[in-house]
Amino acid sequence: MELPGWSDGPIRLDALPAILLGALPGGAGARSSERRLPVEGGGTRLEFEDAIGRRWTALLDGREVLRSWTLFQGGRPTWWWRREAKGGRLSQRDGGRQLAWELVVEEPLRGELAAHEEPAGYRANCPETGVSP
């Protein structure tokens, strides 16, 4: 899926749910110049540059994105995500694109989840960090 101004190419469509829920996008993984600053009332403001020199900011509670993140290019915000009540909003400055969602149905689990079983031959690997067992 193309998100103009986001990257040099399309993002994987299966990455969109995590982005809408507030996770920092995968392209923000390789960080340099990372700074963490305390926020009045609790939480942390995270500021860093990604591998291609774009500036990111996020308001965090521990390691989880709490309220928002912003992607800057050329010194100005181009994409941002904000938590809103029971949902969130992903917005783009140029073009005025917005994608909003809201939780409308919620049900409690009706029992224990099945135990996780890895398929035969499965091997954990994270190409972004180079970590493998």
Image: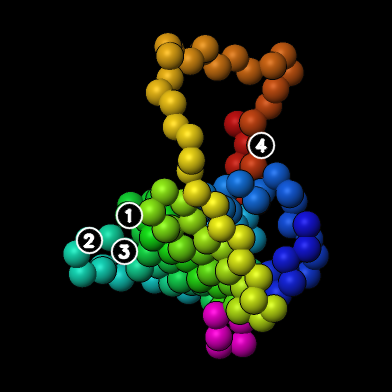
Whole-number angstrom distance, CA of label 3 to CA of label 1: 6 Å
> Residue most toward the left?
41
Q: Main secondary structure of the magenta part?
A: strand
Whole-number angstrom distance, CA of label 4 to CA of label 2: 34 Å
Among the two numbered marks 3 and 4 on one chain, the one whose residue lies closer to the N terminus: 3
Vertical comparison of 132 with 17: above or below? above
- Is label 1 in contact with label 2 (beta carbons under 8 Å)? yes
The one of 125 and 105 positioned closer to us in this rendering: 105
Whole-number angstrom distance, CA of label 4 to CA of label 1: 27 Å
- Is label 4 in contact with label 1 (beta carbons under 8 Å)? no
Q: Mark on residue 44? A: 3
Q: Quadrant of the N terminus?
A: bottom right
The one of 98 and 121 positioned closer to us in this rendering: 98
Circle 3 — which element?
strand
Magenta segment boundaries in residue numbering: 73-77
Q: Mark on residue 61? A: 1
Q: Quadrant of the C terminus?
A: top right
> Residue most toward the bottom?
75
Q: Mark on residue 125? A: 4
Whole-number angstrom distance, CA of label 3 to CA of label 2: 7 Å
**Which residue is at 44% across, 26% downward?**
107
Q: Mark on residue 42? A: 2
Q: Position of residue 120 (x, y in %)?
A: 72, 14
In the rendered structure, which amino acid carries the disc numbered 2? Gly
